[in-house]
């Protein structure tokens, strides 16, 4: 006796799987927002005080910021790993580019975390060490974080938006207005990062924040859509 698969059942299983994938990917995207925004505020004492390494310090606050950024980095990787099996059906090269850029972004974030946590370690073990040398080392570590902050959130998300935005726009897995925001915002963010690189304005400034807004809206709206609505019907889900 020959047993044939029920097409209706197979389609239902495929739809359920796609819905779960979309929800997980959306959750990771939302998690990047919930962790990255407060982390910068928690870092304020070490970023804004050149003599932090010599003072009483707010170590617990900085440690919490580091933990949130580690979670943010892991969520970045999670978005790529979750979406790759779906979007590779549209264009595998672009999908691999998205995964590589997302992993690179996570790596850059972690370098920044390590640099600031190293300042905390220096402050805790500063007894008997030359004060001037400590301040110089602390400033150097903060400077490393500042550059990772420019390259991580300032440059690589634009590459992510170009790769994933192209894939989602072509596949129509989400409303096209969402990836279009990413495709428009990517060159704006890259131009802003270049302006910051050459000292036109500071990265934490009104101009920089305005330039980053389209990418922020793209990622936020994508995360919420995937969590609430999931993927739209598309041939690549077949």
Image (spheres, helix red, strand yellow):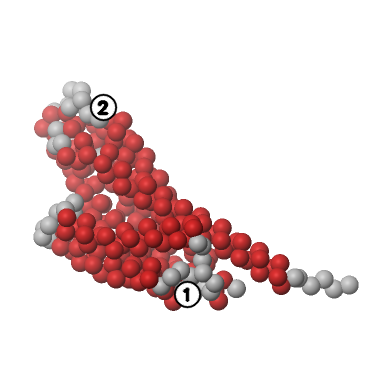
SS for dot 2? helix
- Residue at image x 46%, y 69%? 174
- Residue at image x 61%, y 61%? 16
Question: Label 2: few (<14), some or many (≥20) within 10 Å?
Answer: some
The residue pinned by badge 1 equals: 171
Looking at the figure, which quarter contains the N terminus? bottom right
Q: Whole-percent x and y of residue 224?
A: 43, 57
- Residue at image x 22%, y 39%? 44
Q: Between tags 1 and 2, which lies in front?
A: 1
Looking at the figure, which quarter contains the C terminus? bottom right
Residue 191 appears in which quarter of the rendering?
bottom left
Q: Whole-percent x and y of residue 126?
A: 21, 26
From where the camera sits, is residue 40 visible? Answer: yes
Q: Residue furthest front?
A: 228
The residue pinned by badge 2 equals: 124
Q: Is residue 25 left or right of residue 57?
A: right
Q: On screen, 93 above or below 115?
A: below
- Residue at image x 25%, y 26%? 125
From where the camera sits, is residue 93 visible? Answer: no
Q: Is residue 11 left or right of residue 45?
A: right
Q: Is residue 221 left or right of residue 88?
A: left
């Amino acid at each position: 006796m020959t047993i044939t698969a029920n097409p209706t059942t197979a389609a239902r299983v495929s739809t359920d799987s796609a819905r779960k994938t979309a929800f997980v990917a959306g959750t990771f995207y939302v998690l990047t927002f919930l962790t990255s925004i407060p982390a910068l505020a928690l870092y304020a004492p070490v970023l804004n005080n050149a003599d932090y390494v010599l003072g009483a310090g707010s170590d617990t606050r900085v440690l919490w910021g580091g933990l949130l950024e580690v979670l943010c980095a892991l969520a970045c990787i999670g978005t790529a790993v979750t979406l790759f099996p779906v979007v590779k059906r549209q264009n595998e090269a672009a999908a691999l580019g998205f995964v590589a850029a997302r992993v690179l972004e996570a790596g850059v974030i972690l370098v920044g975390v390590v640099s600031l946590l190293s300042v905390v370690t220096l402050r805790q073990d500063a007894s008997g060490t030359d004060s001037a040398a400590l301040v110089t080392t602390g400033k150097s570590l903060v400077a490393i974080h500042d550059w990772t902050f420019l390259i991580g959130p300032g440059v690589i998300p634009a590459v992510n938006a170009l790769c994933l935005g192209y894939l989602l726009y072509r596949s129509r897995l989400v409303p096209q207005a969402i990836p279009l925001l990413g495709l428009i915002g990517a060159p704006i963010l890259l131009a802003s990062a270049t302006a910051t690189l050459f000292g036109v304005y500071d990265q934490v400034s009104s101009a920089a924040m305005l330039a980053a807004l389209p990418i922020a809206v793209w990622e936020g709206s994508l995360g919420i859509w995937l969590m609430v609505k999931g993927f739209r019907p598309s041939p690549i889900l077949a």
